[in-house]
């Protein structure tokens, strides 16, 4: 019972402003023959006074994600270049530095889903919830984009960032 009250307290304290913030969430439309696809976003851990009060015992981190209507489990991958060949490796935990923007992008860290319950189509939107260790799981609406449009979208975001 105490645990439930504590959890409710946490939800209330973060209802105004989540500690983890997701932006620029996109799902890549899978190629017709593929049953895997990548998901990209930016994530930031805002250490507010409320977060400081939690006295979390270690660095905040994320461990995976759920995409409502598509997949219960998204893996976190990192891109590794080995002997000049680009491959991907699953990692179980990704640490989020305080007050720093981390970009999950093609050729870097990303989320990956496989054997999705339906094929995402460009123009659709799905709710992405990222599993965090200490603070409330952040979520965002992720837009499905065609793979070819992803590069364009990203350069536009970078161009307008400053
Ligand atoms: Cu991957």
Image (spheres, helix red, strand yellow):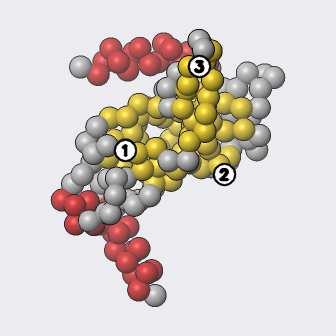
In this rendering, position of residue 58 left or right of residue 143: left
> Which residue: 66% across, 51% down?
72
Q: Are marks 1 and 3 in contact (CB under 8 Å)?
A: no
Rendered image quadrant of residue 58:
bottom left
Inter-mark Cα distance, 3 to 2? 30 Å
Where residue 145 appears, x then y in whole percent? Answer: 59, 24
Rendered image quadrant of residue 116:
top right
**Residue 129 seen from this side:** no
Give the farthest residue toward the left: 49
Mark 3 or mark 2, which is nearer to you? 3
Give the farthest residue toward the front: 83
In this rendering, position of residue 60 left or right of residue 29: left
Where residue 104 appears, x then y in whole percent? Answer: 47, 31
Inter-mark Cα distance, 1 to 3? 25 Å
Structural crowding at the residue carrying mark 2, measured as other residues with C-alpha within 10 Å and reported as few (<14), some (14–19) or many (≥20): some
What secondary structure is marked by label 1?
Answer: loop
Mark 1 or mark 3, which is nearer to you? 3
In this rendering, position of residue 50 left or right of residue 159: left
Where residue 24 appears, x then y in whole percent? Answer: 43, 32
What secondary structure is marked by label 3?
Answer: strand
Give the farthest residue toward the bottom: 1
Inter-mark Cα distance, 2 to 1? 22 Å
Q: Which residue position is annotated with label 2?
A: 72
- 148 and 130: which one is in front? 130
- In the depicted structure, whether residue 27 falls above or below residue 45: above
Structural crowding at the residue carrying mark 1, measured as other residues with C-alpha within 10 Å and reported as few (<14), some (14–19) or many (≥20): some
- In the depicted structure, whether residue 37 falls above or below residue 50: above
Q: Which residue position is annotated with label 3?
A: 82
Q: Which residue position is annotated with label 1?
A: 96
Marks counted in the figure total: 3
């Amino acid at each position: 019972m105490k645990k439930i009250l504590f959890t409710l307290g946490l939800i209330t304290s973060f209802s105004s402003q989540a500690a983890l913030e997701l932006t620029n969430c996109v799902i890549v439309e899978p190629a017709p023959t593929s049953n895997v696809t990548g998901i990209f976003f930016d994530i930031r851990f805002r250490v507010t006074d409320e977060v400081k009060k939690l006295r979390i015992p270690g660095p905040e981190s994320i461990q995976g994600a759920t995409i409502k209507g598509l997949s219960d489990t998204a893996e976190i991958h990192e891109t590794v270049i080995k002997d000049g060949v680009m491959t991907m490796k699953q990692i179980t935990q990704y640490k989020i530095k305080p007050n720093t923007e981390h970009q999950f992008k093609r050729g870097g860290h990303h989320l990956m889903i496989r054997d999705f319950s339906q094929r995402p189509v460009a123009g659709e939107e799905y709710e992405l919830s990222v599993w965090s260790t200490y603070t409330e799981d952040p979520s965002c609406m992720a837009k499905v984009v065609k793979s070819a449009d992803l590069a364009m979208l990203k350069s536009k975001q970078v161009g307008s960032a400053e």
